Every structure is written in C-alpha cells, then in structure tokens.
Image (spheres, helix red, strand yellow):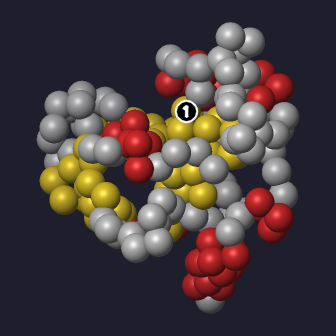
Amino acid sequence: MSNKFEPLTGGCTCGLVRYTVRAEPLIVHACHCRRCQNQSGGPHVINALLEADHIEQTSGELESLQVPTPSGKGQTIVRCSSCKVAIWSHYDFGGLGQHICFLRVGTLDRPDTCPPDVHIYTSTKLPWYLIHPSQRAVEEYYDTKTTWRPESMARLNALRNAVSN
C-alpha cells in the first residue's frame, strides 16, 4: 500500500453489490488452510482485514451465511444476494465478530493494490504453489503483536476498546 491511502472500490461478479473501502487494511492474509481452499475453490483466499465501519456498501443487497470453522466458533460469509459471490466474512477474531471484516481482495476493482503481508497456514499449502522467498510465510498462524504494523495494532486496540465499552 502507498503512504497516501486512496479509497478502494469493489463489488460482486454481477455488479449489483458495490462497496468503498475508506481505510488501509490492517493486514492482508493469504490463507492456505484447507477450509479456505475448499470455500474459495482455489489454492488460498486473500483477505484484507478492516474495521467494519471503514467499508461502505454503496449498492446491492447482501445476505449472510453461517458456516462452521475448525475453532467451532463459526464464520459468517457475507455474499451478494444475486450472484452469491463472497464479499467479506466475519470471524470471532478476538471477540470482534461483526466489527471486523475479512474482505475478499479478489472483489476489489484493483486487487493488485492489496498484496498479502503474510501467507498463513502454509503447512497445508498446495505443493505446487510457490511463495516468493521475499514474502513472509508461517506454517500456522502468527503473533499479531510482532507481525502487524504499529499503526495497525493501534487501530486494532482502539476497536477493541470501542467494542468493550
């Protein structure tokens, strides 16, 4: 991401759902877990984590679908009500639930603006998928405090404080 953030736009395949992202992602994950492979139909899913209030839905109708996760806490996938493309998800990310979105980078008009900061769950990465040696990769998950940028940690802490009050 550049030093000066410019809003990002995106939407679903059929074009009914449109949204604007008004802040730089906290972090961008390329998740190689088997569940993400299965749900996306690809070798991984790329999610940009953002506070929910930094994503403005500008058109269309969304629907939510609850699906199980290995943690047992579940995930809410938010999809276009027409073409069913997954736009973002809500996980129980430190108790933040609906307050944080895992935005599918592939739904951005310019997904190239959000390359992954880290590849996660590479222990189940498909063997033919190569991660460039310059990219950060971990076998499972990472320590947020040592992986996230300081400004992202400050935003995460502010969100946690706002949710707990």
User: Quadrant where the C terminus lies?
Assistant: bottom right
Viewer-proximal residue, 60 or 132? 132
The answer to which image quadrant residue 52 occupies is: bottom left
Instruction: For residue 88, say whether it is visible.
Output: no
Residue drawn at point x = 63 percent, y = 50 percent? 117
Above or below, 68 against 43 in this view is below
Viewer-proximal residue, 90 or 123? 123
Above or below, 33 against 151 in this view is above
Residue 27 locus on image (x, y percent): 60, 58
Q: Which residue in the structure is indicated by mark 1?
A: 45
Q: Tag 1: residue type?
A: Val
Instruction: For residue 118, say whether it is visible.
Output: yes
In the picture, measured across the screen, residue 36 lies left or right of residue 11, that is right
Quick one: label 1, few (<14), some, or many (20+) residues within 10 Å? many
Viewer-proximal residue, 80 or 29? 29
Q: Residue furthest front?
A: 134
Above or below, 120 against 158 in this view is above
In the picture, measured across the screen, residue 116 lies left or right of residue 143, that is left
Residue drawn at point x = 17 percent, y = 48 percent? 60
Residue 39 locus on image (x, y percent): 53, 24
Q: Secondary structure at mark 1?
A: strand
Above or below, 63 against 145 in this view is above
Residue 13 locus on image (x, y percent): 23, 31
Residue drawn at point x = 59 percent, y = 20 percent? 43
Residue drawn at point x = 52 percent, y = 45 percent? 115
Q: Residue furthest top?
A: 128
In the picture, measured across the screen, residue 98 lies left or right of residue 130, that is left
Residue 111 locus on image (x, y percent): 38, 42
